[in-house]
Amino acid sequence: MDGRPVLVCTEYEDATADLVIAELNRRRVPVLRFDPGRDFPAPAVLAARLGAGGWEGRLTVGERTADLSAVRALYHRRPSPYPTSSGEQAARFAAQENRRGLGGVLGALSGCLYLSHPQAIARAEYKPAQLDAATRVGLTIP
């Protein structure tokens, strides 16, 4: 049995992710589920540094911890958006930096399989770029 964990990055009311986690549990695959928009920076804690072999350290959510260098896969499915405050500029800046820091580390894990890569999802939010890509590969767009 491979003891490398799977990270499940999703909102907590996600029935599809619940089914995936149940199957991973049945197969005895370690799972760390978290919702960065609600859990980060607390109760989730990221302690990471870049080493010669990629990102090292750990992601801890509550009592569960995953070794970043051992993560086998990241299942990224509709996490809650990071909170943004319409008020204080410092709070907005902190939320943006949290998103970039955690998302940047998770998007650059060595040897990790992604379903779906967080940065690919972010790029896909730009509809004009999607239409341009579709046109370039010969698809007819409305």
Image (cartoon, rainbow, N blue to C red):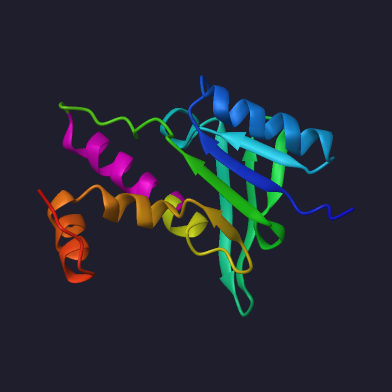
Residue 65: x and y, percent? Answer: 71, 42
What's the magenta bit mostly, secondary-structure-wise?
helix
Q: Residue at x 68, y 33 (%)?
A: 21
**Quarter of the image where one finds residue 54:** bottom right
**Quarter of the image where one finds residue 8:** top right
Residue most toward the right? 1
Residue most toward the top? 13
Q: Residue at x 50, y 64 (%)?
A: 108
**Quarter of the image where one finds residue 113:** bottom right
Which contiguous range is marked in magenta? 88-102
Magenta includes 93?
Answer: yes
Residue most toward the bottom? 52
For residue 71, above or below residue 87: below
Q: Is residue 136 left or right of residue 104?
A: left
Closer to the camera in the image, 96 or 4 = 4
Residue 36: x and y, percent? Answer: 46, 36
Q: Residue at x 74, y 34 (%)?
A: 23
Q: Residue at x 82, y 34 (%)?
A: 26
For residue 83, above or below residue 2: above
For residue 87, above or below residue 30: above
Residue 115: x and y, percent? Answer: 53, 51
Magenta includes 4?
Answer: no
Residue 67: x and y, percent? Answer: 70, 54
Closer to the camera in the image, 130 or 28 = 130
Q: Is residue 67 left or right of residue 17?
A: right
